[in-house]
Structures are given as structure tokens and as C-alpha cells.
């Protein structure tokens, strides 16, 4: 089955822009979806499809795709954006879904 | 408002069994695929299993195939997973999630429950 690779940790200064990336063969076929998880909470969908935000997600969150890489960009990071971010897509080789290992975002 | 409420978690010995439930409300349950996703302590998210809206299509992660059985009762808007032959490595918070097809064959887990904790230990 395919894998999705994410950097384990990223940091950003308050108010600055940060990009979190996700790499995998399945991303050549399927769009990624992105999830934010704060400590002790359930995951929350923040980006899906080409670049779509669910209702209630601030427009500082955006997504992009190129080749085998999907990216989540936070423009003007806020303190409450801290948490773990996971990408996900369907697996091309089987009827599976796969999550990336997660990226821990720290806002300095 | 979509609500997903898991129950049934607890402490079980290795080799034991447990049945988790997820009560759904706020959407037309039988028209959506549903999934179980788990998270071991201090680890990332792991997709476990998905069942289509009708229940006719079922998928499992290799790590649980043959030991976990997903099912649903559309008359009661409830998702289940029967977990047998449990292992220490099955210890995790188990989330149920509503799975929606986006376009083409891309998907999103657009609603999640708060999770139920399963601990497998002697």
C-alpha cells in the first residue's frame, strides 16, 4: 500500500506564513484532505479537494497540489493554530485510505 | 448538526473481544460511507476500516483484517466494529468518522466523534 510522508515538526512565528507538505504516489491520482488535531481533541477537517475549506474554517488555511505533493499553507498563523496536522488520501493500490505521519506545528 | 457518539471502549485482556458502537445523527445516515480511525497513545492517525452507505462494500487495513468486523444498522443510524483476538498494539482511541466523496475518487472525513478508548492489557 502507499504511504504519505510528512515532516515531523514545523515552527512558525506568530503572524507569519507556514507551509506543511505531504508526499506520496497516491497524490498523483487523488486530492489530499487535511486535518488539524489539538491536544486531547478529535481531528478536524480543514482542507479538502483541490482547495476547499469546510464552513467555519478561516480563510488563512489553503491547500495546493503539485505532482506527488500536497501542501497546506497557513497565512498569518495564530496561536490557536498550534497542533498536529495530518494529510490523508485514498490509496491507489487497494481499497484503503492512508494518513500521513503528522506534522506538529508550533507557533512561536 | 452532525453528531457522532462512540461507546463501548474499555480495558480488555489480550485475545479478548470488544464491540464498539457509533450513534449518528444530523444527516441521512444510509447515504454516507462511515469509517473507523484509531490513534495509539502518542502516535498518529491510522485508518482502520470503511463501510459503504448500504453496507455492501467493506474495506479493512491489513493490520486488522480477519480480526475486526465493521457493520452498520441503518434503521438505527448506528455504526459498529466487532474486535476479536485483540492485541496490545490495538490499544488506541477509536474514532468513527463520516466519509464523503468529493469529486472523482477523492474523499474527506468531514465529521468525527470524540472517540472511545480501548486498552488491551493483561
Image (cartoon, rainbow, N blue to C red):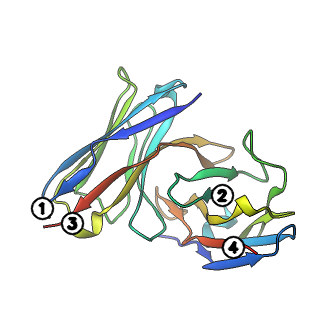
Q: Which residue is mark 3?
A: B87
Q: Is residue B92 left or right of residue A5?
A: left
Q: Which residue is mark 2?
A: A34
Residue density around tag 1, few if under 14, some if 14–19, many if 20 or more, within 10 Å: some
Say if A16 sits above or below A58 in the image. Answer: below
* Among the two numbered marks 2 and 4 on one chain, the one whose residue lies closer to the N terminus: 2
Query: Which picture quadrant has residue B64?
Result: bottom left
Q: Which residue is mark 4?
A: A106
Q: Which residue is mark 1?
A: B15
- Cα separation, mark 1 vs mark 3, equals 6 Å
| Quadrant assignment for the C terminus of chain B | bottom left
Say if B88 sits above or below B21 in the image. Answer: below
Q: Examine the rendering and report whether any part of residue A68 can be seen.
A: no
Q: Is residue B27 left or right of residue B63?
A: right
Residue density around tag 4, few if under 14, some if 14–19, many if 20 or more, within 10 Å: some
Which chain is disc 2 placed on? A
- Tag 3, which secondary structure? loop
Comparing marks 2 and 4, which lies closer to the viewer? 4
Which chain is disc 1 placed on? B
Residue density around tag 2, few if under 14, some if 14–19, many if 20 or more, within 10 Å: many
Which chain is disc 3 placed on? B
Question: Mark 2 vs mark 1: same chain?
Answer: no
Q: At 79% from the left edge and 53% from the top edge, which residue is drawn? A: A51
Amino acid at each position: 500500500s502507499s504511504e504519505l510522508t510528512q515532516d515531523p515538526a514545523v515552527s512558525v512565528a506568530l503572524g507569519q506564513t507556514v507551509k506543511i507538505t505531504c508526499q506520496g504516489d497516491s497524490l498523483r491520482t487523488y486530492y489530499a484532505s487535511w486535518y488539524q488535531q489539538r491536544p486531547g481533541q478529535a481531528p478536524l477537517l480543514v482542507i479538502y479537494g483541490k482547495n476547499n475549506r469546510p464552513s467555519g474554517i478561516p480563510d488563512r488555511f489553503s491547500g495546493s497540489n503539485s505532482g506527488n505533493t500536497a501542501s497546506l499553507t497557513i497565512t498569518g498563523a495564530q496561536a490557536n493554530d498550534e497542533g498536529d496536522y495530518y494529510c490523508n488520501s485514498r490509496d491507489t493500490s487497494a481499497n484503503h485510505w492512508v494518513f500521513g505521519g503528522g506534522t506538529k506545528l508550533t507557533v512561536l | 448538526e452532525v453528531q457522532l457518539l462512540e461507546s463501548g471502549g474499555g480495558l480488555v485482556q489480550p485475545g479478548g473481544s470488544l464491540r464498539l458502537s457509533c450513534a449518528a445523527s444530523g444527516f441521512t445516515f444510509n447515504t454516507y460511507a462511515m469509517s473507523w480511525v484509531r490513534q495509539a497513545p502518542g502516535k498518529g492517525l491510522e485508518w482502520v476500516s470503511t463501510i459503504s452507505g448500504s453496507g455492501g462494500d467493506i474495506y479493512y487495513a491489513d493490520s486488522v483484517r480477519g480480526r475486526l468486523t465493521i457493520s452498520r444498522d441503518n434503521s438505527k443510524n448506528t455504526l459498529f466494529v466487532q474486535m476479536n483476538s485483540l492485541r496490545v498494539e490495538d490499544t488506541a482511541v477509536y474514532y468513527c468518522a463520516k466519509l464523503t466523496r468529493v469529486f472523482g475518487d477523492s474523499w474527506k472525513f468531514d465529521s468525527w466523534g470524540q472517540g472511545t478508548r480501548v486498552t488491551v492489557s493483561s
